Every structure is written in C-alpha cells, then in structure tokens.
C-alpha cells in the first residue's frame, strides 16, 4: 500500500519545564491537609509494624500500608509541585485518579491492614496482664491497628471530598 499523502503529525512532546515551585493553594486545601495526615499516620502504621516482630498476615498488612503510602507520596508530590500533567493518561484525569486511589486503595487496603493488626492484637491480649514477664507485642499491634483505622478514615474523607468535587463538575483537585 502506498504511504498516505499527509502523514499524521507526531504526538505532542512533554510540557515545557518551567521552574519548580510549590502549589501553595494545594497545601492549604482540604485535600492537601488530608494527604499530610495520611502520610504521617500511614508512616506511623508501617514503622510500628516493621519495628516489631511480625508474622503471617502482618506481612500483607505491612505490604499494603507501604504500597498505599508510596502511592500517596507520589500523588502528594506531583500535586504539590503542580506536575500531574506529566503522568500519562492519569494526568488529564487527576481528580478521578485521586478519587479511585483514596476510596479503592486507601480505604480498602488500610481498613484490611487495620483489621489484621487488630486481630493480631486480640490474639496477644493475654500478655497485657500484670505480672506477664515475656516480650509482649500487644501494644505495638494495637497502636498499628489504631493508626491504620484513623488513616483509613482520612482516606475516606479525602475520597468523599474528591467525589463531591466531581459531582459539582469540578475538574481540579482544589
């Protein structure tokens, strides 16, 4: 077959890179503040689990928490720098990306991780008795469970915030 008379133009290149500056409006927005809380409490969760002996389902809880935390860190960094358009396909759907991340990954995985750690704390509740002299993981597991539950709630709030903006036909995250 002969080549077309007018070849298609090449796809546009990446956006021009200007100087990096902080998107301060995002940092002061409800979503920015919720992201800071998610990062702080999420780090408290996985550091608490990783710093103590863990086995069984706690491996999944730690994996889920670190995965969501890293993805949240990426969303926060791109949003703070205003560079989400650099992400192929997702950048043009940034509000929807944040919504799905928060409700599907954030709430789902942190609720599962908090449940796992709560179950493990319940299994270790015997060692919280006065006079028990062996090393006890009850407090660590309970602390992780509480941090995970609060973090799941923060993801629910940010997901609902994104959903509200989407229902109001907003396209931006702030």
Image: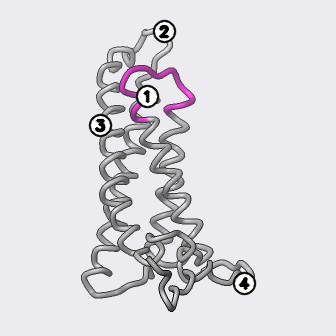
- Residue for point 50% across, 70% down: 88
Judge from the rendering whether residue 125 lies leftward or rightward of residue 23; answer left or right: left
| First in sequence: mark 2 vs mark 3 | 3
Q: Which mark is first along the chain, 4 or 2?
A: 4
Please give the range of residues in magenta: 49-61
Q: Residue at x 38, y 84 (%)?
A: 171
Q: Residues within 10 Å of mark 4 (few under 14, many from 20)?
A: few
Q: Percent position (x, y) of residue 1?
A: 43, 76
Task: Please name which of the two marks, 1 or 2, marks the residue nearer to the observer.
Answer: 1
Q: Which residue is mark 2?
A: 134
Q: CA distance from mark 4 to mark 1?
A: 42 Å
Marked residue nearer the N-terminal end (1 or 2): 1
Q: In front of the other: label 3 or label 1?
A: 1
Which of the two discs, 3 and 1, labels the residue nearer the N terminus? 1
Q: Tell me the mark number nearer the camera, choosing from 4 and 1.
A: 4
Residue 57 lies in magenta, yes or no?
A: yes
The quarter of the rendered structure image containing the C terminus is bottom left
Task: Give the crowd class for mark 1: few <14, some 14-19, many >=20 residues within 10 Å.
Answer: some
Residue marked by disc 3: 115
Mark 4 secondary-structure assignment: loop
**Quadrant in the rendering for residue 164:** bottom left
- The residue singled out by tag 1 in the image is 59
Residue 44 vs 52, above or below: the answer is below
Q: Which residue is mark 4?
A: 18
Name the quadrant containing residue 146. Answer: top left
């Amino acid at each position: 077959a002969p080549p077309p008379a007018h070849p298609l133009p090449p796809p546009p290149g990446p956006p021009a890179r200007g100087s990096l500056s902080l998107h301060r409006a995002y940092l002061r927005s409800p979503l920015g503040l919720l992201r800071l809380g998610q990062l702080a409490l999420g780090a408290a969760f996985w550091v608490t689990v990783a710093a103590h002996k863990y086995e069984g389902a706690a491996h999944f809880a730690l994996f889920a928490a670190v995965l969501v935390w890293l993805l949240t860190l990426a969303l926060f960094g791109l949003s703070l720098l205003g560079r989400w358009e650099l992400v192929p396909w997702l950048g043009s759907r940034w509000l929807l990306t944040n919504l799905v991340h928060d409700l599907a990954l954030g709430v789902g995985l942190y609720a599962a991780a908090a449940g796992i750690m709560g179950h493990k704390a319940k299994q270790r509740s015997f060692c919280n008795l006065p006079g028990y002299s062996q090393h006890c993981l009850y407090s660590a597991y309970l602390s992780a469970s509480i941090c995970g539950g609060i973090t799941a709630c923060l993801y629910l709030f940010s997901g609902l915030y994104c959903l509200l903006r989407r229902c109001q036909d907003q396209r931006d995250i702030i």
